[in-house]
Image (cartoon, grey):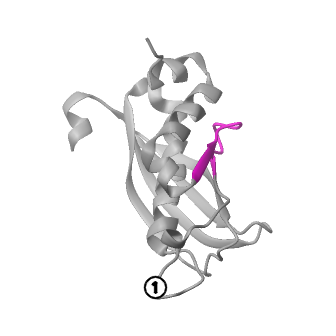
């Protein structure tokens, strides 16, 4: 029997949580590798850019939808330290696609900035491989979702 995400979080087994995320089909299809070596500052790396990552018609930049999906995952992971309260989910996300994300790969870091009740405010930044910021996002992660609330 495999260990659940909740059990891994309760145990503080961040490597196990990281492994479960990295096995998820959606994460793998994005080419994303989640890094939870610091669960307070989750990171996601997309090192290899495939043709389906690119935007527009023949552009050499990562499509904003791909960037947004990776940001959503990594920013949402700021809720992990609160998983014992219940489910958590990104409920609001504002993305400023400031500069194009080149096809050399990119990484995203996120961190919680404050908490009001069950609302965890967070920010994320997309960097190119040289560590230069390209995109900034802010969001709200709803924590402590129980039962029927998870569907809403």
Q: Say whether residue 121 is visible.
A: no
Q: Is residue 111 above or below residue 46?
A: above
Residue lying farthest to the top in this orientation: 1
**Residue 9 is one of the magenta-drawn residues:** no
> What residue is shown at x 37% (from left), y 33% (from top)?
87
**Percent position (x, y) of residue 116?**
44, 44
User: Residue 43: x, y in percent?
Assistant: 64, 49
- The reply, left or right, for residue 138 in relation to residue 151 is right
The C terminus, quarter of image = top left
Residue sitting at x 43%, y 49%? 26
Which quarter of the rendered picture does the N terminus lie within?
Answer: top left
- Please tell me which residue lies in front, 122 or 89: 89
Residue 41's quadrant in the figure?
top right
Magenta stretch, residue numbers: 32-44
The quadrant where residue 16 appears:
top right
Q: Which residue is mark 1?
A: 56
Crowding around mark 1 (Cα neighbors within 10 Å: few <14, some 14 to 19, many 20+) is few
**Does 34 appear in magenta?**
yes
Confirm whether residue 117 shows in the render.
yes
């Amino acid at each position: 029997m495999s260990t659940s995400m909740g059990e891994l979080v309760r145990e503080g087994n961040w490597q196990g949580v990281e492994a479960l995320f990295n096995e998820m089909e959606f994460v793998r299809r994005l080419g994303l590798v989640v890094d939870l070596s610091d669960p307070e500052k989750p990171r996601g790396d997309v090192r290899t850019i495939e043709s389906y990552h690119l935007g527009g018609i023949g552009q050499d930049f990562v499509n904003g939808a791909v960037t947004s999906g990776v940001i959503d995952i990594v920013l949402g992971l700021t809720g992990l330290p609160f998983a014992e309260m219940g489910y958590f989910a990104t409920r609001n996300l504002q993305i400023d696609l400031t500069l194009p994300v080149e096809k050399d790969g990119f990484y995203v870091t996120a961190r919680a900035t404050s908490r009001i009740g069950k609302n965890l405010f967070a920010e994320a930044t997309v960097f190119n491989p040289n560590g230069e910021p390209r995109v900034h996002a802010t969001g709200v992660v709803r924590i402590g979702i129980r039962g029927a609330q998870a569907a809403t």
